[in-house]
Each structure stands twice: as structure tokens, then as C-alpha cells.
Image (tube, grey):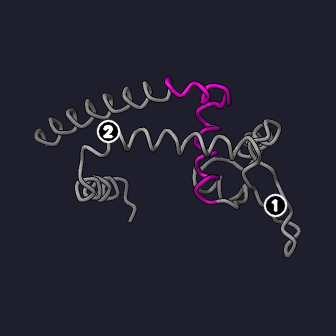
């Protein structure tokens, strides 16, 4: 147990250092601040980007939050033109959520930041090493 605690402390220190690197890079990309997203909105936008089109129920289930909480965030994101909702033509009760004009700009900016991180940091490790990190994180959080 003690050995785990020592390693976990070192992992946490490295995560903190990595967060600082990412924070520095995102500060350099000033446009990110122009979106004025809360941390919750950022996380939900990331989910929408990865799973578009989505429905509010999927977001609520994924983050284990109420549908009304999701609805509030979605309404605000729609107001900001980050997303738009469209009725499912087959099942009118389902409303699909898509990236809006600003949401697509946000996604492009995130891709730009990812490219910077790959060039400056991730490229220091081999693809095999990065895959091993991913596999380890998947084991820890219980995903495949």
C-alpha cells in the first residue's frame, strides 16, 4: 500500500506539471478566452464534439447529472451559438444537438491546441509509450 502512495504522489505531481504546461499553451492561444465557457460548459462541449449528434439524455447519463441541469447548460450554449438543436425527423420527440457556428470555431481552436501539444510535448514520447499510458489510464478508470 505504501509503495502505491509514493507512486501516486509522483503521478499527481506530474499531472500538476502537465496541467501547468497545458494552461500555459492555452493562455498563448488567447482566442480560447473569447468563448467565455464555464468548466461545466467546456466538458459538455467536449462530449458533444466527440459524439455529435447527441441527445440531452445521453449527456445526463454520461455525466450522471440531471436532465434539467443538462437542459440549463444546453440552453446557454445554444444562446451562445455554440450548439443548435434539431428535431429528429423520424422520432419528433428526440431533439438532436449539433455544433453551432461558434461551436465549430471552438472545436477548430481545440484542434489547434492539440497540435501544439503534440508538437511540443507528446512527440517527446513514442506512440507505443503513449498507448501504454492510455491503456494504464483505461485500467484505472475502468474503461476499455
- Which is more toward the observer, 138 or 110? 110
Q: Nearer the viewer, residue 37 or 71?
A: 37
Indicate the position of residue 17 as horizontal and vertical percent values: 30, 28
Q: Quadrant of residue 144?
A: bottom left
For the record, the magenta segment spans: 27-51
Q: Main secondary structure of the magenta part?
A: helix
| Residue 142: in magenta span | no
Give how far across and how far down residue 67 sits, in percent: 72, 50
In the image, taking residue 119 as reference, residue 98 lies left or right, namely right
Across and down, in percent, residue 126 comes to 24, 53
Eyeballing the image, is 12 above or below 126? above
| Disc 2: CA contacts within 10 A as few (<14), some (14-19) or many (>=20) | few
Residue 57 found in image quarter: bottom right
User: Closer to the camera: disc 1 or disc 2?
Assistant: 2
Which residue position is annotated with label 2? 121
Q: Give the residue displayed 82% in from the left and 54% down from the top.
A: 85
Dot 2 falls on a residue whose secondary structure is loop
Amino acid at each position: 500500500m505504501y509503495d502505491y502512495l509514493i507512486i501516486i504522489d509522483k503521478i499527481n505531481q506530474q499531472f500538476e506539471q502537465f496541467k501547468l504546461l497545458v494552461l500555459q499553451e492555452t493562455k498563448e492561444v488567447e482566442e480560447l478566452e473569447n468563448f467565455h465557457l464555464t468548466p461545466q460548459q467546456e466538458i459538455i462541449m467536449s462530449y458533444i464534439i466527440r459524439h455529435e449528434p447527441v441527445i440531452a439524455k445521453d449527456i445526463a447519463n454520461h455525466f450522471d447529472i440531471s436532465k434539467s441541469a443538462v437542459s440549463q447548460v444546453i440552453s446557454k450554449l445554444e444562446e451562445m451559438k455554440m450548439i443548435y438543436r434539431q428535431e429528429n425527423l423520424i422520432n419528433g420527440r428526440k431533439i438532436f444537438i449539433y455544433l453551432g457556428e461558434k461551436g465549430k470555431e471552438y472545436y477548430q481552436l481545440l484542434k489547434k491546441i492539440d497540435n501544439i501539444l503534440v508538437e511540443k510535448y507528446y512527440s517527446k514520447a513514442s506512440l507505443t509509450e503513449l498507448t501504454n499510458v492510455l491503456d494504464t489510464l483505461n485500467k484505472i478508470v475502468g474503461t476499455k
